Structures are given as C-alpha cells and as structure tokens.
Amino acid sequence: MQHLDPDRLVLLALSEETVDASESDHLERCAGCRLDLASLREVAELGGESQEVRDLPPPPEHVWRAIAAEITPVADLTARRRRRARWVRPVLAAAAALVVAAGGTVAYLVSRPPAASVTARATLTPLATVPASAGGTVRVLSDGEMRVDVRNLPLTTGFHEVWLIDPDDLTKMVAIGSLTDRPDVVLPVPPGTDLNRYRLVDISDEPHDGDAAHSGRSLLRGTLTS
Amino acid sequence: MSSDDELAERLRDGDEKALRTAYDRHGGAVLYLAQRLLGNRADAEDVTQMTFVAAWTGRDTYDPRRGTMLGWLLGIARRKAVDRLRSAARDDRVTETVRAQPAPPGGPETPERVLDRLVVADELGRLPEDQRRTLELAFYDDLTHPQIAAVTGLPLGTVKSHIRRGMATLRRRWEVDGAALGSRSAGPSRAL
C-alpha cells in the first residue's frame, strides 16, 4: 500500500492542493494517513489563528504584586503559629542587641531611581554574633514594595529571610521574603501590614529544613522610621 | 533563555524569581486565555493571579517531561476559569433562572481551542528562524510554496522541508501538550 508522501500531506493540509481520486481512495482505507492529514489540517488552522496571540502583552504589574503578596507570607505565618515556642527565646536573647540597632550610616547606591516615594526607611546593623562589617538599608516605597540592600552577610548553607517584627511583642512577625545574591532586592510588603506596629526589620539565617518559622538566628536588625 | 527544565528546578527549590520569569514569559497567554473564557478583564486578571499562586503552591507537581510549562500553566488557568464560570452560573440560576439558557451552537469557542492556539503560537515562536518565517508566510499570508520560494529567495526544496519539519514540530507539541492537558486523548486512537 502506497501511503501519502509527507510533503504531499502538508500541501493538502494547507489547502494548497486538493485530494485526487486515488488519494481519496487511499485515505478511505488507511487510518494512519487519515489521522496524519486531519492532524496537519488542524495544525495549519491553529497556525493561521496563532497570529493574534503572538507577542501578547504581559499582564499589568498590579497583578504580579497581588501574586507576590500572596505567595510570600502564607506558609511562614501558618508554620509560625505552630512553632512559636522555639522562636521566643532566641528573640528575647537578641532583644538586647536591638538597642545597638540605631545609629550608623551606610552608603547606598540606587541602581535605578524608584518610581514611588519612600515612606519609611531603616538602617540595618549586625547583631552581636555577626561580623561588624555586615549591614544594610531598607526602604519601603509608597507602592508597597520594600527595597533591601545588604552587604557582608555571613555565608550560609541556607538562605536569608526578611521579616517585619512587632518590637512590643516579639512573637508577632510577618515574613516578607528571601534575599537573593543581588545587591538591591525588591520585595512586596503584604498589603494592609501596619508598619507602625511591625516596624522592626529583621534579616535571619534560615536553614533549608522545610520549616517556614523563623530560625531564631537573626543577623541584622533595624527599625523603620518615616 | 532558561529552559523549562531549569525553570522547573528553580521553582521546586522555592525560588520566587523563577515564578516571576514564568510570569514574564507566559502571563500574557494566561491572561488571554482567561479573558477569552470569561469575557471580562477584571475576572481574567483575578484568574491570572490565582493561576500563578496555584502554580507556586503546586510547583512540585510540574513535570517537564509531561509537557511544557506554558501548557501546565494554561491547564491551571483553564480549570480556574471554568470553576469561576460554574460558580457564576450557579449564582445566576439562583437569582435569574432565565439566563440558564444553553449556549448557542457555534457560539463561544471551547477552552481547548484557545489553549491549542496559544500552544501552537508558542511553539511557532520557538522554531528555527527559517522554519518560522516560511510557516508565517504560509499561515498568515496564505502564500503557496512557490510564492514563498520567490519571496524568500530559498530553493523550493528548502521551503518544502522547512514547512514539513516546522509543521511536524508544531504537531508534536500540540499533541503532547494536548495530551498532558487532557483536551484530547493521546496517540493515534483518537477520533478524527
């Protein structure tokens, strides 16, 4: 049995040529060629329709912000409720170091000018166990983003996480997101977060242990002021 | 450009930037699908948001061997959009039974059709330049093989093989993602 030539199938699928009598006979008997032709016709039709969906514009940025706001804190907060006890002690121990986290200036270079105005900022200073050269700055922008710039953080086998903590009740905190290798990291602050209450910025060292609660190993701290 | 494999691995590791990359790459297609299915922009943006949040929480379930990331995301978006249509239909039945009319034949296109179109468009964009160009002339400008040869200056035999190979690639992708998404049954047993 002589099957239809692949080039011929393409021409038929594109309606560039029409099926002749012997091909029609063959197609009637041969399920394989029938399938090939039907599939290629479908592909040709979809190909024609594809013009309108090439290079679609990306969704507006506010959609991404809503996504980012949703994916960052959820796991952390639910896990924290479960495991609060472990967190309390190291925080209280570290609380003394908070007093230190006041002064200090950090040279800060902005890679591109922020579109939104700065509504709050904090200078981050190292806790007692952390090399004194470590530090950073945090700015919260009017569009709800937080820009974090840190330097000389101790190397970790895990990752560095940013938190906003209520200094009046150190068991209350919001996970903001994790830092990357880039110097200027932008993280969304969950909409509705009360920055007057959650004003203590905390950068922690988190192991990859699948436990989303604060590890208790704080590295940098600073308080947001407007 | 990182491959779906690499993106999937970064996603599984909990790298939020990988989700952002997927969003930059495929967010437009997800929004388009949602808008075609729901017919309104606000709902479509909601579904886009839900899709990427679901992709994040379900990131362990994506297997690059079973389909592309676009196909996976569109599958999630389709489910979210259909859920929303169903719940809207439920609300309508309660408040306004008149509107519970069956859709007219030849009316709105099926989710599968929109999805197939997006998958084919994506694959077309990934084809080697020569294949892509000849297929665009065939699909969009309705040029015949000899006309394409004249326009591009390529020998007719080359045009033929570009088109044949390009269409074979599109077909494979369409069948793989279609099978992964369950919009068609896989393999040659499917109804014609």
Image (spheres, coloured by chain):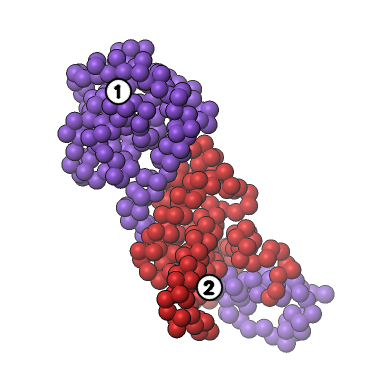
Chain colours: A purple, B red
Which amino acid type corresponds to the residue marked 2 in the rendered image? Thr
Please tell me the numbered disc located at residue B152: none
- Whole-number angstrom distance, CA of label 2 to CA of label 1: 54 Å
Circle 1 residues within 10 Å: few <14, some 14–19, many ≥20: many
**Residue at position x 46%, y 23% from top?**
A86
Mark 1 is on which residue type?
Answer: Arg
Viewer-closest of A122 and A183: A122
Q: Residue B134 location, x and y as percent?
A: 51, 66
Q: Chain of mark 2?
A: B
Query: How many marks on residues?
Result: 2
Please give the residue where the numbered disc 1 appears in the rendered image: A221
Q: Of residues A101 and A193, which is closer to you in this image? A: A193
Q: Is residue B142 left or right of residue A173?
A: right
Where residue A181 appears, as percent x and y from the top left, is 39, 29
Q: Are marks 2 and 1 on the same chain?
A: no
Figure quadrant of residue B168: bottom right
Whether residue B71 sits left or right of residue A191 in the image: it is: right
**Chain of the residue where label 1 is placed in the rendered structure:** A
Tell me the residue at 63%/49% (across/down). B65
Give the residue pinned by disc 2. Answer: B110
Against A66, residue B80 (above or below) is below
Q: Secondary structure at mark 1?
A: strand
Q: Mark 2 or 1, which is nearer the eye?
A: 1
In the current view of this chain or complex, which residue is farthest to the right?
A1
Q: Residue at x 58, y 80 (%)?
A: A15
